[in-house]
Image (cartoon, rainbow, N blue to C red):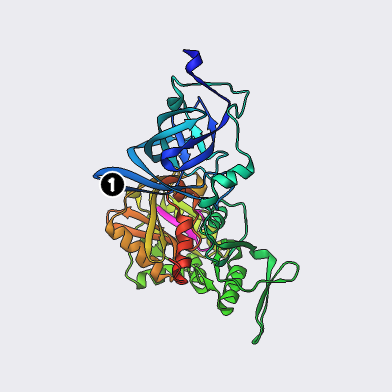
Amino acid sequence: MLQHKVILGSEEWCSFPELGIPTIKARVDSGAKTSAMHAINIAPFIKNDANWVKFDINPIQNNIKTIIHCEAPLVDKRIVKSSSGFREHRYVIQTSIRIGDSKWPIEMTLTNRDSMGFRMLLGREAMSGRVLVDPEEKYLLGQPTPESLKELYQNSEKASSGLRIGLLASNPELYSNKRIMEAGEMRGHEMHFLNIKECYMKLDAKTPEIHYRGGKILNQFDAIIPRIRPSITFYGCALTRQFEALKVFCLNSASAITQSRDKLYSLQLLLHSGIGIPTTGFANSPLDTDDLIKMVGGSPLIVKLLEGTQGKGVVLAETKKAAESVINAFKSLNANILVQEFIKEANGKDIRCFVIDGKVVAAIQREAMPGEFRANIHLGGTASVIKVTAEEKKIAIKAAKAMDLKVAGVDIIRSSKGPLLLEVNSSPGLEGIEGATNKDVAGEMIKAIEKNFKLS
């Protein structure tokens, strides 16, 4: 029986002839039950009255320019728990794997494995009865040279469409920023990371300029994607405004970002557009604390710092006494605060709709940790896929339009009065929403730029 089994090391190269993948490096892991393949732009469809799924893959690690478009019969959709404990819904396909001279059918799930070391994970279900693993060895069946890899994938290179795009942000290692850079390069654009703190500008009627550390002039950009953290809103928006003066297309304008960062003004703009929000109070004097608490329906209530972000500066006051203490403490520091009714029936859950160019491209439900009322992912909240209602979609699109944002993370809470809008974020994070939905949200941002230049 043993002589019929293939002996593999802990890492091997394999191929998927039916998917058009000539070779891909796999992690051979008998500790994992299910096999998984890296996939983006995953979309189910009907073919000959059967369920199929199409997806794209970058088969070579650290090479995002090489892309294969695949389609396969859809077997199932199931919840898979990753090694980090994250649960996600994944599509399951069936296809043939070839390892060495052997070929057999396997099932595998599709998921974004950008953060993993391997594009392919070969689990024990696919190896059962066919494979023996020697964990001390690697590439027992050989491995391709860089030259042969290039030859195998010579027809898979993405042609450049020539846009020069700058990502104006602070941290190149942030998941969202890395994904935007990758998505742009994958679609054939020349991407540049521009650190906000290393940019400075020349204000001049005839020759306005933006310089980069060392005196390099930043010119001839087609588009800029501003991803400005709240602590540097003023300077980041000044730079964005300067790019606008140079006639560079900015995915979100400086004025839209500025007004979205002013919580009070943004709520007033949303109300002006007829969008419902939790009842909110704002006052200058601590002498009005009692009436302010009554105004929002009494305790429990939420107290928010106007300058807070990612759930920071947000306090739940469960009693009237606690509310008075928190409000007066903030007021004694001359902090501007909002007092807001607490939507108890939401149960620590909210909905994040990701709006790009007037469309909801992805949505997740965020759920707070036990004992916590803030559902922000940065505070340990969990994300799961949710089907949003037509009314919730309408509110999200309307909110982004009211704020004049082409890209927005719109937070909605479900209440007994119907959906209410909590906040609109001009630089929404991608990690939680891409991880939960398997959607290429970063790619949709690049498509919005292409649409402006009539490339898509």
Tell me if residue 224 comes above or below residue 246 in the rendering. Answer: above
Crowd rating for badge 1 (residues with CA inside 10 Å; few <14, some 14–19, many 20+): few
Q: Residue at x 41, y 47 (%)?
A: 55
Residue 234 coordinates in the image, percent (x, y):
59, 70
Q: Residue at x 39, y 70 (%)?
A: 401
Q: Is residue 42 magenta?
A: no
Q: Nearer the viewer, residue 441 or 47?
A: 47
User: Disc 1 marks which amino acid?
Assistant: Lys
Task: Name the residue tied to disc 1.
Answer: 47
Furthest toward the bottom, the residue is 206
Q: Residue at x 62, y 69 (%)?
A: 235
Furthest toward the left, the residue is 49
Tell me if residue 61 comes above or below residue 248 in the rendering. Answer: above
Furthest toward the top, the residue is 1
Residue 143 figure quarter: top right
Element type at mark 1:
strand
Tell me if residue 85 comes above or below residue 336 in the rendering. Answer: above
Residue 87 coordinates in the image, percent (x, y):
43, 38
The span picked out in magenta is 301-311
Q: Is residue 303 magenta?
A: yes
